[in-house]
Amino acid sequence: MAEAVPTAGVQRSPLGVIDPRVRIAYAAAFAAFVVLTPARHPFQFLVHGTLVAALYAVSGLPVSSFLKRLGAASAFVVIITLSAFLGWHGEGGSPPFLELALRLWVKPLLAVAGATALVSSMEGHELFFGLRGLGLPRALGDTLIFLLRYAPTLRIQIGELRMAVEARSFGWRGIAGRRRLLSSLGSLVGTAFLRSLYQGEAVYRAMLARGFSGELPRPRVPLKPRDLGFLLSGIALLSLNFAFVP
Amino acid sequence: MRIAVRIRDLRYVYPDGTEALRGVDLTVAEGERVGLIGPNGAGKTTLLLHLNGLLRGRGDIEILGIPLRKGTLGEIRRLVGLLFQDPDAQLFMPRVFDDVAFGPLNLGLDDGEVRRRVAEALRAVGMEGAADRAPHRLSFGERKRTALATILSMRPAILALDEPTSNLDPRGRREFMELIRGLGATVIIATHDLELVLELCGRAVLMDRGRVIADGPVREILADAELMYSHGLEVPPSLKAWSP
């Protein structure tokens, strides 16, 4: 694609040039290896952690964005860990702290961090086309693609409708005001729904006009040697770490 | 000269009962640029939607000698590129490249040819470098130009443009006109922008209430004040300025 279509202005990180299908597949493989690694061997988790740091370093993600995604995804990990400690009824009165921490906290955190570094460095369309390339059902993939395209348009339209409502309203205070607000919200949602229906019809016509026959076409993008190299070397590293315990 | 579009006695009634076309006859020669003018509800857009087979009324339509029917729909859609008024209806993929490639891929072209056509179409509309951008992040003028690229990539013989300059700023409008002028294809433009018709088209077709009211040289039609006023239009300012 890059050969024929100039993509000036799009800065790709070293990880960004790897095919999305490979990145998604490797994220799944990485998570599987982390989960399957026995919690008795902290050294292996150290290697996994180093790998995540390396992936992050080449992902081009800003630190804040990476931490934000990680924080949102790992909140549930903290809750599970706490509840496991509080509800521990095993022998000996207290859990083997390191093993439990590795099993309940480090494992999910590493899996999420690896996936974040690999997948968050993609644009939305890369993620969906990547998933489709990996066998995501066509209907689901196409729906996600339309959602990605039209969510911002719908948001803008709702914003415009809201402004139109507010421009002709004079406060929502009191019971009467609240009633007006609720009734306005109802109209707004209804109008947004109707507009999206009309938009859907117009889009479908535009698709038919360009020969649409039921499936969103996509050019075949063969995997490049660098993609295969990335995948194979990554899997080899995970396998070595899994097989050889110091 | 070869006939690009031949329409005979075309009639169309919308499901709600609105008679949109009431026996339209129109012939457009290859390479001709025709301005389709008329008040709101005249049937201009409905007529354009018929050229591509998106609406099917009663009557006969031939595109470059091919009669429009179910079996020829694919061929007709390859020949007629339809530009919609709202670029957000035309740009439905999450990335400009995929949108411009949509038509050529549906034509069954190989990947190399698709990429060549995408690059060529984007270059033609001055959007090279935007292939990886999301359509909703483009300005309105950029979206209009990209929408045109989505049909240029199919290399249609006939361009049917619905209000191509609406909501464009003067510079965007000027660029759009120069772009259309340089294409050399048969062009049918449905528009309220009479100055655009005057500058770009050699012929004007005035429609009102689903019928063709007048058809002739653009200056003759547009300068006829009585005709224009009686159908909800006005003589363009540039023609007023030059009239005695």
Image (cartoon, coloured by chain):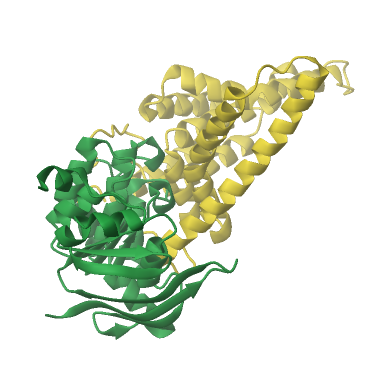
Task: Answer with the quarter of the image where residue B46 lies.
Answer: bottom left
Q: Position of residue A241 (x, y in %)?
A: 50, 35
Percent across and percent down for residue B37 are 30, 58
Q: How far across and how far down the image is residue A62, in percent?
A: 41, 20
Residue at x 63% of width, y 39% of height? A36
Q: Is residue A115 visible?
A: no
| Apparent side of residue B141 relative to residue A162 in the rendered image (left or right) | left
Task: Name the residue nearer the viewer: A72 or B131.
Answer: B131
How many numbered marks have been drawn onto this rendered protein structure?
0
Q: Nearest the camera: A26 or B86? A: B86
Residue A111 visible in this rendered orientation of the protein = yes
Give the residue drawn at x 53%, y 37%: A157
Q: Position of residue A174 (x, y in %)?
A: 80, 15
Is B8 or B243 nearer to us in this picture? B243
Q: Nearer the viewer, residue A156 or A26?
A: A156
Figure chain in yellow: A
Q: Quadrant of the N terminus of chain B?
A: bottom left
At x 24% / y 59%, what residue is drawn?
A: B152
| Residue B128 vertical placement versus B116 (above, below) | above
State the image quarter where residue B126 is shown: top left
